Image (cartoon, rainbow, N blue to C red):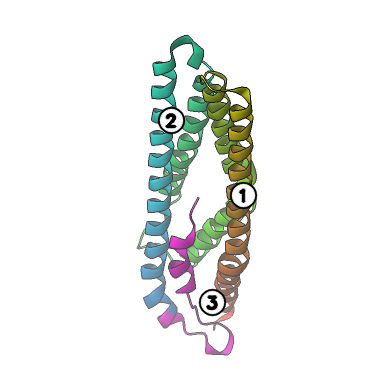
Amino acid sequence: MNWSDLQSVWSGQNLAAGADFDPAALQRDFEAKRRRLARGLFWRDTREAAAGMFVAGVFAYCGWQMGRAGWPLSAAVALMLGLTGFFVRERVRAHRRRVGADAPLLAKLDAEIAELHRQHRLLLTVGTWYLAPCNTAAAIFAITMEVNAPIPLAAKLAAGGIMLGVLATVSWAVWALNRRAARRLIEPRLNELETSRRAFLSFP
């Protein structure tokens, strides 16, 4: 799961606050930046959903080619389709909660803060909702292929060890990168938005 494409969006949301707070400047700049974030999330969810569909298709094709021996791959297909469904649901959720361009600025701020809190939670829990189904599906695929492969047991064990090492390394990297994104990208943006909201409410 790659969140780096959102870095430029979040890093560009430099909202004035405190003594330098300017409601007019915030009103001018906020809508464009809100749309940039929405576009970034849209393309992220679209890519992830498409990738899930592609991997599910590969698993289904391999299982079909294997015949009855490939039946365990149906579970791997279901897991990947479920993950695809999650990203589709994210798009539906975002559409239903979308705030119109003519909405009050305070409503836009509240919606943006809520969305960033949502993304923050997703980043911190990526191991549960993203890595777990991906790794389980990959393990099912690898074990099914190895069990039915006409190679010596030693080769199967070696291949399994390599696969386990790759999954562990990739999973750790994804987990670490997502936590870093939550800490360095989203949390500062949330602080800026919440500070701007308080300044907006207290502005005479």
Number of marks: 3
Q: Is residue 14 covered in magenta? A: yes
* Distance CA(mark 2)–CA(mark 3): 48 Å
Query: Residue 149: horizontal and vertical position, in percent?
Result: 51, 21
Q: Which quarter of the figure is the C terminus placed in?
A: bottom right
Nearest the eye: 147 or 92: 147
Quadrant of the rendered image containing residue 154:
top right
* Distance CA(mark 1)–CA(mark 3): 45 Å
- As drawn, the label of residue 40 is none
Instruction: Write the start and end of the magenta stretch as one range.
Output: 1-25
Residue 78 position (above or below residue 112): above
Give the labeled residue for mark 1.
Answer: 169
Quadrant of the rendered image containing residue 201:
bottom right
At a point 43% along the width and 12% down the height, the residue shown is: 67
Inspect the image, locate mark 1, and give the three-letter code of the amino acid beneath it.
Thr
Residue 101 position (above or below residue 30): above
As drawn, the residue found furthest toward the top would be: 68
Structural crowding at the residue carrying mark 3, measured as other residues with C-alpha within 10 Å and reported as few (<14), some (14–19) or many (≥20): some
Residue 84 position (above or below residue 143): below
Mark nearer the viewer, 1 or 3:
1
Mark nearer the viewer, 2 or 3:
2
Inspect the image, locate mark 3, and give the three-letter code of the amino acid beneath it.
Phe
* Distance CA(mark 1)–CA(mark 2): 22 Å
Structural crowding at the residue carrying mark 1, measured as other residues with C-alpha within 10 Å and reported as few (<14), some (14–19) or many (≥20): few
Inspect the image, locate mark 2, and give the three-letter code of the amino acid beneath it.
Ala
Q: Secondary structure at mark 3?
A: helix
Give the labeled residue for mark 3.
Answer: 200
At a point 64% along the width and 37% down the height, the residue shown is: 161
Give the labeled residue for mark 2.
Answer: 56
Q: Secondary structure at mark 2?
A: helix
- Going from N to C along the chain, the mark reached first, 1 or 3, is 1
